[in-house]
Image (tube, rainbow, N blue to C red):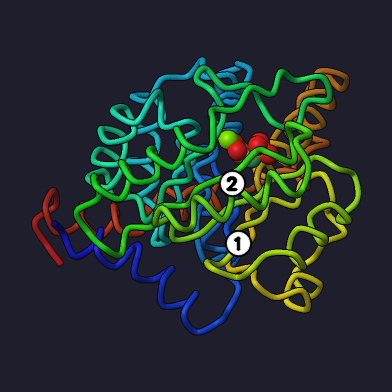
Amino acid sequence: MTARRKSAGRLIRDRLRSGVLVRAMAAHSPLSAKLVAEAGFDAVWASGFELSALHGLADMSLTTMTEHLGMLRAMVARSPLPVIADVDTGFGNAINVIHTVKEYERAGAAAVVIEDRQFPKVTSLREDGRQDLVSAGEFVRKVKAARYARSDDDFLIIARTEALIAGLGQPEALRRATAYAKAGADMVLVHSKCRTPDEIESFIRAWSGAVPLALVPTAYPELDETRIGELGKVGLVIYGNHAIRASVKAMRAVFAAIARDGGAANVQQDIASVDDIFDLQGMDRVRDEERRFLLGSR
Ligand code: SPV
Ligand code: MG
């Protein structure tokens, strides 16, 4: 086990223990993971939605574990932050979860988030999405399998319930969250696609606090960190898809302007400078290495 992997989960656990909200921002590439660190977030969210969108695919188990794992490994290599892996259903049943946890831990992830949907999954935020969950009993066994598979006790197993998304109601969501915490999940992520925070706030108030909660306030962005702090019981907030949405809007505007104008003169102020990209690429370090190893002088 490397020091890096050990410290990745430990960084999150230390912050959780000190009662400070952990803030994770979505990324879909090593470059976006670097920008997450630059902006001052605590962790990178290796989002399945973002990676699917990057491939031009729906977030419905169409990208493979190998693709997601490869991208996660590249992000871990380029970002100083702990990376929280969105592994969807764990790519199958409890046996798949064992393999998934071992592979993601070995790749340097700090945590995995596993959701109680059936494989293949359907994206959560779609209005008319099919919402088939596995039974609470089966998912409890998947959580136990995840705990069994990790080799570093600091590696976090975050169990995600989609009960509210599936319309099963708060009692069922609480029943599932309680069972997952009892099975050994380090945190429970509870997701909602309501356009107001009411459903989630009600869940938080009813939650026993057995383990900290994780939230993804995409559909109800007015639930900000100040309000989350007031509510308590929440250890992690994930900004789930803001990297890909920011990129799409920026690219669309710049591409349209160049196509319209027949040249790039008018977009110079709207795009990053080449020097900015050089910095992100570590060009200073490369220059130094050239001096040392190619040109023979220091
Ligand atoms: C993701 O970012 O892939 C998530 C969050 O799982 S959501 O898309 O809102 O389900
Ligand atoms: Mg996802």
In the rendered structure, the answer to whether residue 131 lies left or right of residue 265 reads left
Q: Position of residue 26 (x, y in %)?
A: 59, 47
Q: Residue 213 got which mark?
A: 1
Q: Nearer the viewer, mark 2 or mark 1?
A: 2
Residue 288, image x and y in percent?
A: 25, 60
Q: Residue at x 65, y 45 (%)?
A: 240
Q: Which residue is mark 2?
A: 176
User: Is 296 or 150 nearer to us in this picture?
Assistant: 150
**Res 38 → quadrant:** bottom right
Percent from the top left, x then y, of residue 146? 33, 44
Relative to residue 40, is residue 291 depicted above or below?
above
The one nearer the camera, 183 or 262, is 183
Residue at mark 2: C-beta within 8 A of ligand 1: no
**Residue at 24% from the left image edge and 64% from the top image edge:** 6
Q: Residues within 10 Å of mark 2 (few under 14, many from 20)?
A: many
Q: Nearer the viewer, residue 94 or 18?
A: 94
**Amino acid of disc 1:** Leu
Dot 1: element: strand
Name the kind of residue labelled 2 in the image. Arg
Q: Residue at x 30, y 50 (%)?
A: 147
Identify the residue shown where x is 73% and y is 76%: 229
User: In the rendered structure, are the residues bearing label 2 and label 1 in contact, judged by CB atoms less than 8 Å apart?
Assistant: no
* 207 over 45 or under it: above or below: below
Distance between the alpha carbons at the discs numbered 2 and 1: 13 Å
Q: Position of residue 242 (x, y in %)?
A: 70, 45
